[in-house]
């Protein structure tokens, strides 16, 4: 089947035209009427794949009626292209069913097709990194050096010309126990040494022989090992070794972090431009300390900074022993190692606890992480740095390492004292467990977004859009303009390596900060509303991560995952109301343009959805923050059904007539459009649906509505009678428009929790341009 003309499905294609992802968040996919529904996520995913096999260009005969489970052979077979069920991974309110591409019976490196199934066994999205044109590698001879034999530490030492021991290459217990897999890998010279982080070292690799050719597929053996590097500590590595020649065709350092930049938190947040710098007066900085409760600590004698989630350890030079106290209080000056240790424990513990506060089971989210994680408060030989390395197998968090905050020799403040840096590193930790990689692929990490959105409510920072306002070296921002090239697939997005990844991270943080601003973050001075918007957005960011299982080159799958996270109850609120703003936020940063945009790339905002019917509330269908207007220009009253377009004051006790103007922001015509008007029986409605009379009055609009705001269609008249009640000083009518492919957030057929309620209208009506409420004063 083809979804290109289905307004309920977002189709993303690769540069060669093949489907990369299908987003069904608007209307989750279910089997056609008359077919038996699936009983479990695997059955649902497989039924779905059988239907979309042609879209993903999966060769006929590859998918059987039931899925074939992955069983890795000890050597290549004659089997051609395969798509094998590899994993059923529980995620947040969903299950990721992951299929692995195989050639010759062996898994192809980083070639997977992931299907996200919700709790009703419906398909929310799918995403593919498979290569349907991949050629089966030449079968190595049975006596190939590493066909039957594992790679030893001594072998690695010879290949890398490095010593073998605890001071050199060695295998940790987990790495020895994990079987070395045979895989198929496509060799690319430019990707031969990939760093899973921004500050890990590279190793000198010997040249591959001429028999290893660019773009060809080879049978390789995966080896996980450890190698300590001066200034970086004990790093975990992954190597792919071609079994015939013994050449290292791919090397990956499993670490992530920030190098050489200073990030501060409390001083700039509290005092703005008056804040002392990291090399400022110690006495002044000490005055800014807060006495806080250190949560989740485990009682020891004397008391150490060890707890449920984090444990302060000295794992790297310089030697700085974890502090202890016999008084129950860690009270140290800001320039000391002990102050850095207390901050490191507090910030990391607070971030892990944030998951639980937002409703995510921490142990489930970090199911591959061993707690408490190691946190070194003073590492990197006293250089400016911070890292969130992966664990020995690259499948979870390996803890955190913090260095100094300032390269100035007169400053000894630890970077662990900066919550924003800790939040940045925590973004990597989230991804290590979710996708076994510290970056999204389309961006460095969610860390800058977490830092900016968490710290914004009530902040006195002089520049609200400076992501790290106390930084003396670097200026990363979250208000980047599309016209300046800061767009998805724009000039600042393009490029490889970790330098461009930091540019992409600013595109992501600008996108997600726009979402936060739109749902209340721009309510400057209203801390309660800002804080609600901050926590809701943090929930969506983390909830989106909780449902993805693979990296992606563009954020389409992540957008769908965030929308899915918004579907049910969120922080005690009926969810679903923010889903359209999520897409809009990415659209405004240039997403959804067709691929292959000519050089220099995307420089304009992205196109809207195919259908986006709206009632003008003064924002012309957009979602920039504004307090809810009770006087939208798209709704008016007439004292007679005369079709007039000028509002008239209602006449009490007799029939009046409401009219609603509808436009279409989408790129295509809106079909089967109808408007429903609900009258409130109370003067000050605040909750849907309790404060409105349902069902409302429905009026269809004749014919389609042209896209791109080219046409205004008038629905009405809607008869209503203002009550002759002295307690009423005003009347309220709520209008909702729906069209094929664009349901309102209160439409019962949407299945959204916010449609059932009870939902505060302040967090409902402004978040959906299909809705508008008009007050009529007496």
Image: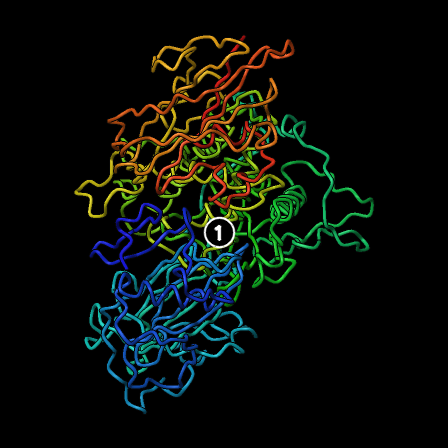
Find the residue positioned furthest to the bottom: 143
Question: What residue sits 25% from the left and 71% below the top?
Answer: 59
Question: What residue sits 35% from the left and 23% below the top?
Answer: 661
Q: Position of residue 479 (x, y in %)?
A: 39, 31
- The scheme the figure's colours follow is rainbow
* Residue 271 seen anywhere in this rendered image of the structure: yes
Mark count: 1
Near-viewer residue (530 or 477): 530
Question: What residue sits 26% from the left and 36% below the top?
Answer: 669
Which of the 4 image quadrants contains residue 190? bottom left
SS at mark 1 in the image: helix
Q: Position of residue 166 (x, y in %)?
A: 53, 72
Which of the 4 image quadrants contains residue 530? top right
In the displayed structure image, the side of residue 187 where residue 580 appears, left or right: right
Q: Against 392, is 416 above or below?
A: above
Near-viewer residue (239 or 77): 77
Q: Against 148, is 538 above or below?
A: above
Q: Residues within 10 Å of mark 1 (few under 14, many from 20)?
A: many
Q: Against 221, is 202 above or below?
A: above
Q: Which residue is mark 1?
A: 545
Q: Quadrant of the N terminus?
A: bottom left
In the displayed structure image, the side of residue 247 where residue 86 appears, left or right: right
């Amino acid at each position: 089947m083809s979804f290109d003309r289905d307004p309920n499905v977002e189709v993303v294609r690769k540069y060669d035209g093949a489907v990369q992802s299908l987003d069904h968040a608007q209307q989750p996919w279910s089997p056609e009427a008359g077919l038996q529904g699936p009983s479990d996520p695997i059955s649902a995913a497989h039924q779905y794949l059988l239907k979309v096999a042609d879209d993903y260009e999966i060769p006929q005969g590859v998918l059987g009626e039931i899925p074939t489970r992955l069983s890795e052979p000890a050597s290549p077979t004659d089997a051609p292209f395969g798509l094998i069920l590899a994993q059923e991974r529980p995620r947040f309110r969903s299950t990721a069913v992951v299929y692995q591409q195989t050639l010759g019976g062996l898994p192809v490196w980083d070639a997977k097709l992931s299907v996200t199934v919700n709790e009703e066994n419906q398909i929310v999205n799918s995403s593919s990194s498979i290569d349907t044109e991949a050629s089966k590698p030449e079968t190595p001879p049975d006596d190939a050096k590493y066909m039957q034999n594992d790679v030893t530490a001594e072998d690695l030492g010879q290949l890398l010309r490095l010593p073998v021991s605890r001071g050199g290459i060695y295998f940790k217990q987990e790495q020895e126990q994990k079987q070395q897999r045979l895989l198929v890998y496509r060799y690319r010279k430019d990707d031969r040494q990939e760093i899973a982080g921004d500050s890990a070292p590279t190793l000198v690799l010997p040249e591959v022989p001429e028999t290893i050719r660019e773009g060809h597929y080879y049978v390789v053996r995966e080896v996980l090992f450890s190698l300590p590097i001066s200034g970086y500590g004990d790093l975990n590595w992954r190597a792919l070794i071609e079994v015939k020649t013994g050449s290292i065709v791919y090397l990956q350092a499993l670490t992530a972090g920030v190098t050489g930049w200073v990030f501060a938190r409390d001083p700039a947040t509290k005092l703005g431009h008056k804040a002392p710098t990291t090399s400022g007066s110690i006495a002044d900085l000490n005055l800014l300390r807060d006495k806080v409760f250190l949560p989740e600590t485990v009682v020891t004698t004397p008391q150490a900074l060890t707890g449920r989630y984090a444990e302060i350890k000295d794992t790297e030079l310089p030697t700085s022993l974890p502090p202890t106290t016999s008084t129950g209080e860690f009270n140290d000056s800001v320039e000391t190692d002990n102050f850095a240790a207390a901050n490191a424990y507090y910030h990391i513990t607070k971030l892990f606890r944030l998951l639980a506060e937002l409703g995510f089971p921490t142990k489930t989210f970090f199911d591959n992480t061993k707690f408490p994680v190691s946190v070194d408060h003073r590492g990197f030989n006293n250089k400016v740095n911070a890292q969130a390395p992966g664990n020995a197998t690259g499948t979870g968090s390996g803890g955190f390492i913090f260095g100094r905050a300032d390269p100035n020799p007169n400053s000894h403040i630890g970077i662990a004292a900066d919550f924003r840096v800790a939040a940045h590193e925590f973004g990597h930790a989230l991804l290590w467990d979710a996708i076994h990689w510290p970056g999204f692929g389309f961006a460095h990490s969610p860390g800058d977004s977490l830092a900016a959105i968490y710290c914004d409510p009530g902040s006195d920072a002089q520049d609200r859009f400076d992501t790290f306002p106390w930084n003396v070296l670097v200026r990363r921002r979250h208000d980047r303009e599309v016209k300046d090239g800061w767009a998805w697939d724009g000039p600042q997005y393009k490029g490889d390596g970790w330098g461009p990844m930091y540019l992409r991270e600013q595109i992501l943080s600008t996108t997600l900060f726009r979402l936060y601003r739109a749902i209340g973050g721009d309510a400057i001075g209203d801390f309660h509303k800002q804080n609600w918007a901050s926590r809701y957005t943090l929930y969506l960011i983390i909830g989106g991560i909780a449902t993805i299982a693979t990296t992606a080159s563009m954020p389409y799958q992540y957008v769908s995952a965030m929308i899915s996270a918004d579907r049910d109850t969120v922080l005690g609120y009926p969810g679903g109301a923010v889903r359209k703003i999520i897409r809009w936020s990415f659209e405004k940063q240039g997403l959804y343009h067709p691929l292959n945009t000519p050089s220099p790339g995307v420089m304009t905002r992205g196109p809207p959805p195919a259908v986006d019917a709206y009632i003008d509330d003064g924002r012309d269908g957009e979602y920039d923050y504004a307090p809810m207007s009770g006087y939208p220009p798209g709704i008016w009253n007439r004292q007679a059904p005369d079709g007039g377009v000028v509002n008239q004051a209602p006449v009490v006790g007799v029939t009046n007539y409401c009219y609603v103007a509808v436009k279409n922001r989408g790129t295509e015509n809106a079909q089967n459009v109808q408007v429903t008007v609900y009258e409130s029986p109370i003067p000050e409605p605040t909750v849907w649906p309790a404060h409105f009379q349902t069902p409302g009055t429905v009026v269809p609009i004749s014919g389609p509505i042209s896209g791109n705001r080219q046409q205004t269609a008038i629905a009405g008249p809607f008869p209503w009678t203002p009550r002759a009640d002295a307690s009423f000083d005003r009347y309220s009518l709520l209008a909702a428009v729906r069209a094929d492919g664009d349901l309102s957030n209160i439409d019962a057929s949407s299945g959204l929790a916010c449609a059932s309620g009870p939902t505060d209208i302040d967090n409902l009506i402004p978040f959906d341009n299909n809705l508008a409420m008009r007050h009529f004063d007496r």
